[in-house]
Each structure stands twice: as structure tokens, then as C-alpha cells.
Image: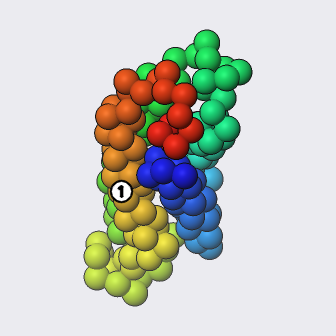
Amino acid sequence: MGPLGLLRIAQIFLCVVIVCLITSVFGPGPFKGVLFGQTLLLTVASVAMLLTFIFLIAYFFTLHLSHLDFFCWREADLTFNVVCAFLFFVLSIVEAYYSTGSWSNNCNDIGSDGIIHNGCRIIYEWAFASFLTFALAILYALSAWLSHQNRHSLHDRNRENLY
């Protein structure tokens, strides 16, 4: 398995970890109403994980050359990776804002044992999720760059050079 396959596995793993970190915080969360950005991040991470898994399976079993050769896999892969890199970059900034507690109403929702904003505490799970979301944006950008570099090898039949 080449670097694109390993990148896809890392992307799937980080999507799962981000979803777990966001939903693990007791108290306020993505389903409370004020944190729509987290619900959006959960949705984007889940859909990206699903589509990344589909690309991983299609390339691993060389379905893009045998059974599903009618679909423009490389162009769709490049577009998907660029869109994911942009979305995860923006959502990492949103998640960093949520992790500071600045959105809360005088810290009534999250407690007040920190010094970030009006004495509100930082939510460490969400801060780590923000860092991982930024790392995921970098991984998708790297995957887009590698997809762009491999765009001419669509009809390469040698299995070692495919993925």
C-alpha cells in the first residue's frame, strides 16, 4: 500500500477520533442548539470518513480500472480532497473558538475555573479536536497534492504503481 492508502487510513482514523472527542464532553455540546458549528463538523467528518473509505476500497481493489472504469475517479478524488481540506481548515477555527468557552453565557454552561474568557474554562477535548481537525485539513491537502501528481496514471495497469 502506497502513501495515498496510508493517508486515507490516517484520515479515517482522525475523523473517528474527532467525532469521539466532540461528543465525549458532558454538558454543552453539538446538540444543544447554540453550537451549530460542531454539528456541522460532526456531519462533515462523518461524510468525509465515509467517502474516504469508498475511495480507499475502490483504489485498493483497483475497481477504478476494472469494474468502475466509467467514473472519473482521479478528478473526483482531487475535488473531494480540496473541498475537505478547505472545510476542515475553516471548521478547525470554529472548533478552536468553541473550545475557549467564549460562546457561553457568563460561563453558566461550562463552569468557571480558567482565565480564557470571563474566567471560563477551556474545554480540552474540543481544543484537541480543533488541533486534530487542522491536522486533518493538512492531510487532505497532502492527499490532494498527491492525487494531482498521480492524475496521469489513470490507465496504468501495474498494481504496484497504482496505489
Residue 86 visible at all:
no
Quadrant in the picture for residue 79: top left
Q: Residue at x 37, y 65 (%)?
A: 131
In this view, the residue farthest toward the top is 70
Q: Secondary structure at mark 1?
A: helix
Mark 1 is surrounded, within 10 Å at the Cα level, by few (under 14), some (14 to 19) or many (20 or more) other residues, namely many
Q: Is residue 121 left or right of residue 155?
A: left
- The total of numbered circles placed on residues is 1
**x, y percent for residue 156:** 49, 27
Q: Residue at x 39, y 44 (%)?
A: 143
**x, y percent for residue 149:** 32, 34
**x, y percent for residue 100:** 35, 68
Q: Nearer the viewer, residue 8 or 67?
A: 67
Residue 142 visible at all:
yes
**x, y percent for residue 140:** 40, 45
Disc 1 designates what residue? 134
Height in image: 147 above or below 117? above
Height in image: 126 above or below 65? below
Amino acid under label 1? Phe
